Amino acid sequence: MGRYIARRMLAMIPLLFGVSLVIFLLLRLIPGDPVLIMIGVENATPEEVVRLREVLGLDKGLHVQYLKFLGRLVRGDLGTSLGADEPVSLLIGERLPATIELTLAALFVSLAIAVPVGVVSAVRKYSALDTGGTIAALLGISMPSFWLGVMLIFLFALRLGWLPASGRGEPFLAGVWTLVTSGSPGGLFLAIQHLILPAVTLGTALAAVATRLIRSSMLEVMSQDYVRTARAKGLQGRRVVMHHALRNALIPVVTVVGLEFGALLGGAVITETIFAWPGIGRLAIRSIVQRDFPVVQGVVLMIAVVRIGANLAVDVLYAIIDPRIRYS
Amino acid sequence: MSRWFVLPVVVAVVLTMMNPAITAPAPAGTIRIGMESSPTTFDPGLSTDLYSHQVYSQVLEGLLVLDPQGVPQPALAESWTTSADGRTLTFKLKRGVRFHDGTELTADDVKFTIDRILDPATRSPQRGALSQISSAEVVDRHTVRITTQAAFVPILTNLSTSAYILPRAAHTRLGREFGRRPVGTGPFKFVEWVADDRIVMEANPDYHGGRPTLDRLHFRFIPEASVRLAELESGGLDLIAGVPAHDLRRLRVSLLVDLHEIVGTNYRLYALNTSVKPYDDVRVRQAIAHAVYKQKIIDVVWPGRGVMAEGPLPPTSWAFDERFKGLGFNLTRAKQLMAEAGHAGGFDMNLLISDTEENRREVVLMIDMLKQINIIVKVISVDFPTLLDRLLKANYDVLRVGWTTNPEPDSLLYSPFHTSAIGGFNFTKFRNARVDELLDRGRTIMNRNDRIRTYREAQRIIVQEAPMVFIFHEKRTYAARKAVSGFMPHVSGWIVLKTAYGADVKVGPGR
């Protein structure tokens, strides 16, 4: 297993080179001059533009710029933001924890909904519960997150006043830390309050997909011989469902959820914008609009690393869930 | 099974009920402000964007400060004199002003600030605004002499907006860190910045303009306009910038919230590239201007968000000419001009716009209006950086864009219309000897009334020559809870809370 993971990690390197090249070229293909946006229309004079372009190295040939970028990248340096004159790694490092926190919370929300609803729908096939679940799932898939997010804000923040409309409050882990060290739960409450609406917004679509998947996967497994055997042995219904059926039904679910984790990171861009969540999604949008090339490159590479990492984690999880799978 | 399902719901409900944060009101004296976007840096030499300005202008100050009408008033400079040739400005600094770290403000700090912006190695985007300065010299501890290459009156405005005075010692010590932990002389001291989430400041009790009434500032950055408003109305914020258009009418009569509006120093326009046929013919340009029913564009696309433009000078500019009428809607005249130019049968127009919802709606009206004079509009929609790129290369026929500057008429008119700016921001390639002469003169005469006359005449010629169709001046909108008092929108779009000239915002109890 260890060797397998090491091999996969090595395979990441050429993949990331590919990603870096594609994003580098894509950014330069779209028109728009970062220098102009930086100076601002009212201050720019043509000489000023040319001079800044030289200072920033944007006047060099594309291959020179790419090799420089690559040279720094190999040394673990993502470069410096054109706008803020700050290291890209710092800008990303400050925001990545917030995005990961939101993504994991959304994953938690979606599974907390999908697993029970999916299982019940399968066990009570064609019951009212099953039909209700199907309709809810269809709604969940169809609702765009920007709409759902705004509606949730109007209901829970503006009308009912139960939850804050935006912002992060406190980092979740910081909240846990205060609870452990000083016994005060305030920070944790603050963190969870701020997390609920964005996590539900981001997690709803995945919850819907996963519900349908768990239902069909459960239906398939429930008709397998070993489930009949388990029942024949006289095991309780609940035990059969939870221990014999669900565990096996989860294998395809793990694949999809693992892949969807990457999609959640992408979807977080929209959710972060709606809820003013201080993550890398907002950084990405701002940098694209400002044509802050180094920051966009950094964010894309970071998302690529996380996504590839998630895929690897899925493959490792297989082996744990399904003992028949062995890597060497 | 049901246990699984119920648990998260119970947790969520319990958490909402406990609710320590939302029900607890912000402490008295704290104002919570929602902005559209977060700043990039607190270093005023490294950014020109509005959002950075809104935060660093609370902590740092210039020699001068623009009052709400855009006229320079004393800030760190107590007084100033101009030499007979207009090239040398001597500033007397206020005595006993201290930076937040306790060091005293001296002429050396002023020289350091200006030299740093002018030094190409700083790569300062403010350099263009100060590029007329040839030197800044320390005369004595509290006197600075600034010399410009030629007489250049707008430098007073540019010093107010682009030269926030840095403490030499602290800036040298902190280096790049200064952009995150600024030290200034301003009414508020920096406390904390959580990236993209919030910035906190506290009152500077020793402020030379008197201690601010507010104790603390919380800036939050919420890109979605409707969410910003929801935060305001649910009590999470006290003041927001940028109100969603469809809520304006409701908020004008709201019992909870005050709406503040101001016409900015800007104009929204359709540019006609005068170096491209048929737009090189002034009759064609005038015909297009006469065919556009501006008020309809405002009513349909920008209701309550703009005032009709007669020319480039907006009503909030001190050079505004209230009696001046531009080329108004007149279809008969438009058709006549088209016929005179030999285009009675019309032509195809390539119109470049940046892809926003408002622009798309505006263009639908334009297509209809210009069809009346047989012009068939073909729309090319791109993102803003692309538009800017093509604008600067004058690689377009007609394009829709906005021009926003500081309140100085020179900034509103010089680069878009002076011949020397062709290849730069004179993107219509407009040439007019009289306009050049007037704009040059406006830079050198000191008398405000003479300047007003000069700029008004330039406006008359520009509108008549019609390199642009001026549609409207956009308003900036703010909404504040009733407990906030003393807030006045500033012509530059800045959020001004406390200044040496007298602004002082308060937050009452009743939130």
Image (spheres, helix red, strand yellow):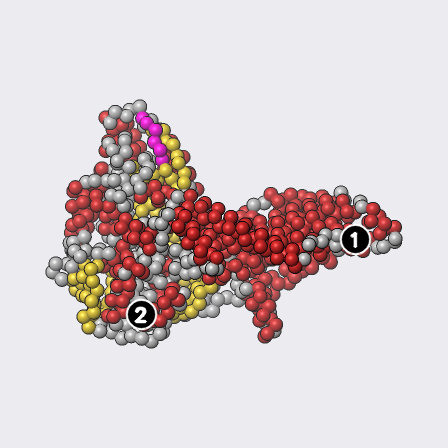
> Which structural element holds mark 1?
helix
Q: Residue at x 38, y 45 (%)?
A: A32
Q: Which residue is mark 1?
A: A244
Question: Taken as a whole, is the magenta stretch helix, strand or loop?
Answer: strand
Q: Is residue A105 magenta?
A: no
Res. B454 mark: none
- Picture coordinates of residue B493 (x, y %)? 35, 55
Q: Residue at x 58, y 52 (%)?
A: A11
Q: Given the current orientation, which residue lies at the most extreme top position?
A: B345
> Which structural element holds mark 2?
loop
Count residues near mark 1 (Cα–Cα under 10 Å), then give few for <14, some for 14-19, many for 20+.
some
Q: Could you tell me which chain the residue with mark 2 belongs to?
A: B
Q: Residue at x 62, y 44 (%)?
A: A141
Q: Could you tell me which chain the residue with mark 1 belongs to?
A: A
Numbered range of the magenta stretch: B346-351
- Of A208 and B257, which appears nearest the observer? A208
User: Can you see residue B423?
Assistant: yes
Q: Amino acid at mark 2?
A: Pro
Res. B167 mark: 2
